[in-house]
Every structure is written in C-alpha cells, then in structure tokens.
Amino acid sequence: MMISVPKQPGNDIDVYISPLIEDLKLMWDQGVVFERFANETFKMHDMLFCTINDFPAYGNLSGYSVKGHKACPICEEDTTSQQLKHGRKTIYLQYQRFLRSHHPYRRLKKAFNGHQETSGPPTPLTGVEVYEKVNNIEHAFSK
Ligand SMILES: [Zn+2]
C-alpha cells in the first residue's frame, strides 16, 4: 500500500490502514482458500511482518515519539541529544557507537562532538521485554 496524498496524513494514517488491518485479521483468523494450478486448493493465512516508511510515518504507525530528546527507538532513554542554541533544533549524537569497535569514524573527534566514541550500542530488548513495554498500551484511533 502506498499512500499518495499532497500532505502527510499524520495520525489520520489509521484511516488508510484500517481496511488493510481488517483484511489481515480475517486472513489470519480464517485464512483464504486459493486454487492452485492443478485444481489443488490450499488455505493461506497471513500476517504483517514489517513496514517500510519514513521516520515521521514510523511515529504515526507505532505511536512512538519521533521528536524530542529521546526520539531514537533503539537507544530510547539512553538517546544522546542536544538542542542547538540558535536553530533550536534537536540533534542526536553518539551514533558512532553503532559502528564496529575499530571503525575510523570512532576516532574522528572534530567531525562529530569532540569526543572519541568508546561505547558500544545499547543491548537490544528481548521479546519478553518488548511485550512488557507494549502490553498495556491503549490506543485511541483518531477517526
Ligand atoms: Zn539511537
């Protein structure tokens, strides 16, 4: 599905996604019977595995905050950010920590924040930890 509108839908993206979700639920619960080439039939179930979208749409789809000081969905509370004095924009630092330990960019102090990066990436959450975080989220659709 590609949403092509002059202005991004924001949280109204659920208006476009809702029919897709209904079809996915139906196909997950009941499945759909398909006929193969040699008159054989099979029942197909489906699931939404992943989405490809820009960062603002990611925020709208997931409900995750993609603005502010803790906007990185990987680093979360450990996000290193700074607000620029004159532009008042929030910038995100320390992203070299995702590079391999001997990557030359880790030593480029002047090109980044003036510090050599020695820390590693944050530890990914386990499936149980992710479930505990999202288990009790209540979502109110906008339309
Ligand atoms: Zn991050």
Image (cartoon, rainbow, N blue to C red):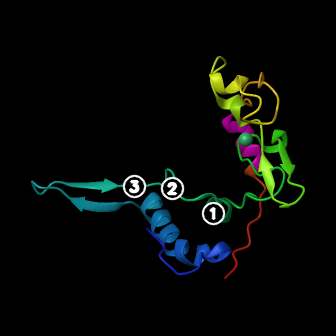
Furthest toward the left, the residue is 38
Q: Position of residue 36 (x, y in %)?
A: 17, 56
Q: Position of residue 46 (x, y in %)?
A: 42, 55
Is the magenta region chiefly helix, strand or loop?
A: helix
Mark identifier at residue 45: 3
Left or right of residue 12: residue 23: left
Q: Position of residue 68 (x, y in %)?
A: 82, 57
Which residue in the structure is indicated by mark 1?
Answer: 61
Mark 3 lies within 8 Å of ligand 1 (Cβ measured): no
As for residue 11 lying within the magenta part, the answer is: no
Cα distance in 3D space between marks 3 and 2 = 21 Å
Ligand 1 located in image quadrant: top right
59 versus 82 height, above or below:
below
Q: Is residue 109 visible?
A: yes
User: Which quadrant holds the C terminus?
Assistant: bottom right
Cα distance in 3D space between marks 1 and 3 = 23 Å
Furthest toward the top, the residue is 102
**In this picture, which residue range is highlighted in magenta?**
126-133
**Amino acid at the residue labelled 3:** His
**Amino acid at the residue labelled 2:** Ile
Residue drawn at (78%, 55%) of the image: 136
Q: Secondary structure at mark 3?
A: loop
Which residue in the structure is indicated by mark 2?
Answer: 52
